[in-house]
Image (cartoon, helix red, strand yellow):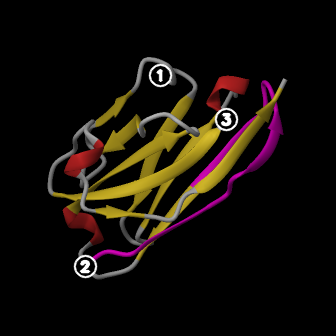
């Protein structure tokens, strides 16, 4: 079992930065690939980025590549999402998710989810 708690969301102006954190419980955090997804009202949950268990591999949605960076600290059971050059279209609830062993871009392949944190980017 993995429990996830996101933090770090808020309101920021376009062009600004935020760093989201996702703290995981459990002793096997390093066995889980981690992903970030986002969702706006009336839309499906959208893949943002994912990182492998050892942080050796990452993947990004085209819409955020070059602006967002995912990282993890297995000693602290935490995954981060550094978001730079934010745009109004990045406004969403951001969720972290855990999947045993390997990454995926599909939300239905992640078994554990946090409660989400709101990110609002004003123009």
The label on residue 87 is: none
* Residue under the image location 24 percent in, 47 percent down: 108
Q: Nearer the viewer, mark 1 or mark 2?
A: 2
Q: How would you rate the neighbour count of disc 2 (Cα within 10 Å): few for under 14, some for 14-19, many for 20 or more?
A: few
From the image, tell me which residue sits under label 2.
1
Q: CA distance from mark 1 to mark 3?
A: 16 Å
Give the magenta-colored segment's residue range: 1-20
Q: How would you rate the neighbour count of disc 1 (Cα within 10 Å): few for under 14, some for 14-19, many for 20 or more?
A: few
Q: Position of residue 37 (x, y in %)?
A: 44, 43
Q: Position of residue 18 (x, y in %)?
A: 70, 44
Helix, strand or loop at disc 3? loop
> Can residue 49 be found in the magenta stretch?
no
Using residue 53 as the reference point, say whether residue 47 is left or right of it: right
* Residue under the image location 50 percent in, 36 percent down: 69
Query: In the image, is residue 119 above or below residue 43?
Result: below
The reply to whether residue 63 is in sight is yes
Using residue 40 as the reference point, say whether residue 108 is left or right of it: left
The label on residue 91 is: 3
Q: Position of residue 7 (x, y in %)?
A: 62, 62
């Amino acid at each position: 079992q993995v429990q996830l708690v996101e933090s770090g969301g808020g309101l920021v102006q376009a062009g600004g930065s935020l760093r989201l954190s996702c703290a995981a419980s459990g002793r096997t955090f390093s066995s889980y690939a981690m992903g970030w997804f986002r969702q706006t009202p009336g839309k499906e949950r959208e893949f943002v980025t994912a990182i492998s268990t050892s942080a050796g591999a990452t993947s990004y949605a085209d819409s955020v590549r070059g602006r967002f960076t995912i990282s993890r600290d297995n000693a602290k059971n935490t995954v981060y999402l550094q978001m730079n050059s934010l745009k109004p279209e990045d406004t969403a609830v951001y969720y972290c998710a855990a999947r045993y062993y390997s990454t995926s871009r599909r939300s239905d392949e992640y078994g554990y989810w946090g409660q989400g944190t709101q990110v609002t980017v004003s123009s």
